[in-house]
């Protein structure tokens, strides 16, 4: 039975590629013009299949205006915006926590925590300067403008005339307007770790490039989703240093364990730890250039890095449309509940699946190094995640 | 692990109902007018959800013309058509075979065979008379006009002006024209047993009523799909009797084991044998009346019975559109490959899943009572079935 589940799951990885996504390529479809609503729904949303689309937003003033830093500064100068600060560029990602040294069960205590950025409201002009300075090699503080709370229609409403309010062919296909529109301004070091969202996502790049690694929801076991204790960075302006504090009371976040770009010294260890990712089918790869749009289907795992424009900036706007929680979602939950390995296998407990959606925390307690471990396999409430992300 | 699979599968039955189909009803959506192509694709095809549609074919001449037997006789009088004859009204269904008495493994030898009708080319006027006579209580020969080989555009092309060539909103939504259009003329005793098709199906009733029992593809384990040896009825005009002959060489057909309407004396036995069907969520039920159209989504298990018009006939036309073999199909195959029970369970081998699609045979060998058993769980080639059905 255990062997059968392993084989069935691996067959699923292959079959979804053979049937729908392409088994001999890591490329996704590239449309040279926007699809009709029917084509988009039939060929991409319904089969849950990503595509890259050119010539869909060529009329947006943003494509020329936002290359001008002075335009952005003038338009938003005094607007307070939410700046995300980390010591690495990697917010909402797994980070070693120096004080987590549990001595009791479970058998595989996490040495990593799910670290969220220090978020501070600053004037846009200051924020933009700090993101730009993140490109210098001697910085210890990396800034990323990436508040995922419909910020483009709130904090950045001064820029709203520069883009369409929604993506017409997507809105018509999906039968609704976007639930949230978010602006992203990052540097070449801004990275978003593997996760999935419960939204249909239309991702438009304005300046610079974004590079996505994509895995279909059927590959969930390859992401090694585990429960990590939530922690938050705190930045001291006085010292210019970060401290990483565990949330109190403790909160666990199911998150993908795989870093697809480990350092060369970590690579062997990572490959040994996550063989299903490294030895399985390669992720789909797509570079979204300025003026292009990515359809990132709901529930797809994605990792995002970026190449900046000549100023050192990558700017993007994404539109989150409500997904449909239908038979595909029910099938996903079923798949996720099937263990790849048997209970007798020593690795079993570490393979326990959970959800893997970004959960931004607004409350933050006092510092606490106390880690209370959730029962392995306790995934209650995982389907109720707040999903916020790119 | 076995318990976990059982629980996961049962959760899936519930979740797909809670999320999408409705968990407190056995009714399906009823649209009072044809959907737009986008609505049909978004709300029904993509989520793989059935619906009943009124006022979509009111302009078809068939709705008035086909109530006249003399019109049908005149239009098709000399056309040779394929008449399906059985001693029960149940073609393509499981039937006890008197000569199957295997003495060797497997542990659960089938005492049932998959019986196909005796098919004979006769003039339409004769065929229609024989279907009508099937309503008399003393007949030993039940006739059903139900050749599923695009017959409406071939054998019955004389009637083609009476219906649309295709269903416009479905063709636009699905991006293609029908792969096959079939005509069905049956009596109140014509029954089609539980199975599924690899087509999106638009089913239009012209006279009489059709009653469908529907289960979503996620309920595959509840259908007890097993391999049955194929057999064929042979009707002797001389004696007026049927003989049931096993195919030679032997051929196995994966078919649903559940009869939802067992006789009162068989009911307890059936309920004990198929508890997942009888104790699980009730099937969706829909009666399609003359002038109404059913969207029967691909991969849904369906059982069809009928109530005739005043002449004793039920006439319907169905349109088969190619389905998309996408992530939903891959998920289905994965689900089907997961055993509900563990290998150690005595019932396990009988639970082995296969496909469950009607396979009409054209070749037929000499009589043979030799039954060679396929290996339990050998489902190779199941995904390549020819699918023919209502």
Image (cartoon, coloured by chain):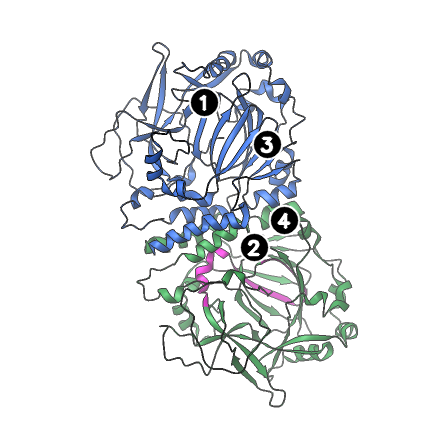
Chain colours: A green, B blue
Q: Position of residue B192 (x, y in %)?
A: 45, 29
Q: Which residue is mark 2?
A: A28
Q: In the rendering, at what x and y percent does residue A35 appear?
A: 66, 49
Instruction: Rate crowding at label 2 as few (under 14), some (14 to 19) or many (20 or more) other CA atoms within 10 Å.
Output: some
* In front of the other: A213 or A198: A198
Question: Residue under circle 1?
Answer: B189
For label 4, count other residues whose C-alpha is less than 10 Å away and answer few (under 14), some (14-19) or many (20+).
many
- Can the viewer see residue A157 in this picture? yes
The chain containing the residue under callout 1 comes to B
* Sequence-first tag of 1 and 3: 1
- In percent of the image, x 33 and y 43: which residue is there? B351
Write the start and end of the magenta stretch as one range: A199-226
**Residue drawn at the location 46% of the way across and 14% of the way down:** B133
> Which is more foreground, mark 1 or mark 4?
1
Image vertical order of residue B3 relative to residue A133, above or below: above
Inter-mark Cα distance, 1 to 3: 22 Å
Give the residue number, with chain letter if any, for mark 3: B293
Say the numbered circle drawn on residue B74.
Answer: none
Q: In which chain is the residue bearing label 4? A: A
Q: Do discs 1 and 2 share a chain?
A: no
């Amino acid at each position: 039975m255990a062997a059968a589940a392993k084989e069935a799951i691996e067959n699923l990885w292959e079959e979804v590629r053979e049937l729908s996504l392409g088994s001999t390529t890591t490329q996704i479809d590239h449309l040279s013009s926007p699809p009709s609503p029917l084509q988009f729904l039939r060929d991409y949303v319904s089969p849950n299949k990503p595509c890259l689309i050119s010539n869909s937003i060529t009329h947006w003033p943003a494509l020329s205006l936002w290359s001008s830093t002075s335009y952005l500064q003038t338009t938003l100068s005094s607007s307070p915006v939410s700046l995300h600060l980390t010591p690495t560029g990697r917010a909402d990602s797994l980070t070693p926590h120096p004080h987590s040294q549990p001595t009791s069960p479970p058998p595989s205590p996490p040495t990593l925590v799910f670290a969220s950025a220090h978020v501070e409201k600053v004037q846009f002009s200051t924020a933009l300067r700090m993101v730009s300075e993140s490109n210098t090699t001697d910085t210890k503080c990396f800034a990323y403008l990436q508040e995922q709370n419909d910020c483009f229609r709130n904090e950045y409403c001064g820029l709203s005339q520069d883009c369409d309010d929604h993506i017409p062919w997507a809105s018509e296909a999906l039968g609704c307007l976007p639930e949230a529109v978010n602006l992203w301004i990052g540097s070449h070091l801004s990275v978003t770790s593997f996760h999935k969202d419960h939204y249909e996502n239309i991702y438009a790049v304005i300046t610079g490039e974004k590079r996505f690694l994509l895995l279909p929801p059927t590959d969930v076991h390859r992401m090694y989703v585990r429960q990590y204790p939530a922690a938050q960075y705190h930045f001291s302006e006085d010292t210019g240093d970060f401290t990483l504090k565990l949330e109190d009371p403790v909160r666990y976040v199911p998150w993908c364990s795989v870093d697809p770009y480990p350092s060369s010294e970590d690579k062997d260890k990572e490959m040994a730890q996550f063989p299903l990712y490294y030895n399985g089918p390669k992720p789909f790869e797509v570079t979204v250039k300025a003026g292009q749009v990515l359809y990132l289907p709901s529930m797809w795992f994605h990792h995002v890095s970026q190449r900046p424009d000549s100023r050192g900036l990558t700017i993007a706007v994404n539109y989150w449309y409500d997904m449909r929680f239908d038979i595909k979602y029910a099938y996903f939950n079923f798949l996720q509940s099937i263990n790849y390995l048997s209970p007798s296998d020593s690795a079993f407990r570490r393979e326990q699946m959970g959800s893997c959606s970004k959960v931004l925390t607004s409350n933050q307690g006092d510092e606490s190094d106390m880690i209370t471990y959730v029962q392995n396999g306790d995934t209650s409430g995982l389907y109720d995640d707040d999903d916020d992300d790119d």
